[in-house]
Image: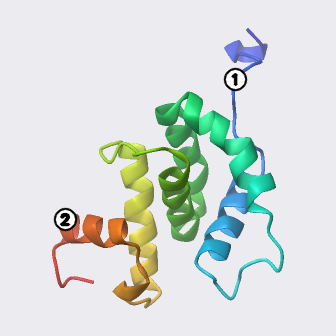
Amino acid sequence: MGLFGKRRDDPGLPADIVERVLAYIRTETRSPNAPASFDAAALIYLPLYPLAKADPAGFTARLAAAVLPAGGEAARGGARLVWDLIDGPDRTDPNYLAMLDAGLIWLRSTGVGMAYLTGFEVEHWHTTRGVGNW
C-alpha cells in the first residue's frame, strides 16, 4: 500500500485525461475546435485500452469521475471513448449512462441536430426521452 492506502500499482488515468478526451471527441466529430494534429493511437488507444480491457467497470467509473465535472462535451467524449475501447460496454453501467446523458443534453443545448448523433446515441435518447423530443 502506498500513502493514504492507495496501491502504487493502481492503474489510474493520465493526469491530463480531460484534455485528451476533449481532443478525442473533437477530432472524432470533426469539430472546428479539433486540434490541428492529434495522435489518437499514442494519446488514447495505446495507453487507455489496456486499462479499459483489464477492468471495464473500474475504467468507466474513473473516467466518469474525471469527465463529468468538466461538462457535457467531455462527458460525450467519455461515453464515446468507453464505446470505442470496451467491447460491448455495459449499457446499464450508471457511470456510462451518466456520461452518455450529460453528453447528449449538452449536445442538444448547442442546437446540433439529431442527424449528428451516432446510432447508439439516438437509440438511448429515444429510449430515455422519447421519440420526437430532441
Disc 1 residue type (three-letter) = Asp
Which image quarter: residue 81?
A: bottom right
Q: Position of residue 94 (x, y in %)?
A: 35, 44
Answer with mark 1 or mark 2, whichever residue precedes in sequence.
1
Compared to 61, does 55 lie above or below?
above
What element does badge 2 sit on? Answer: helix
Q: Label 1: which residue?
A: 10
Query: 43 or 16: which is nearer to us?
Result: 43
Q: What residue do we see at 71% from left, 68% from top?
A: 23
Q: What residue do we see at 77% from left, 13% from top?
A: 2
Instruction: Report whether 63 appears left or right of 14.
Output: left
Tell me, for residue 127, which label it has, or none. Answer: 2
Instruction: Report whether 88 appears left or right of 68.
Output: left
Query: 81 or 5: which is nearer to us?
Result: 81
Query: 52 or 131: which is nearer to us?
Result: 52
Q: Position of residue 57 (x, y in %)?
A: 46, 34
Disc 2 residue type (three-letter) = Thr
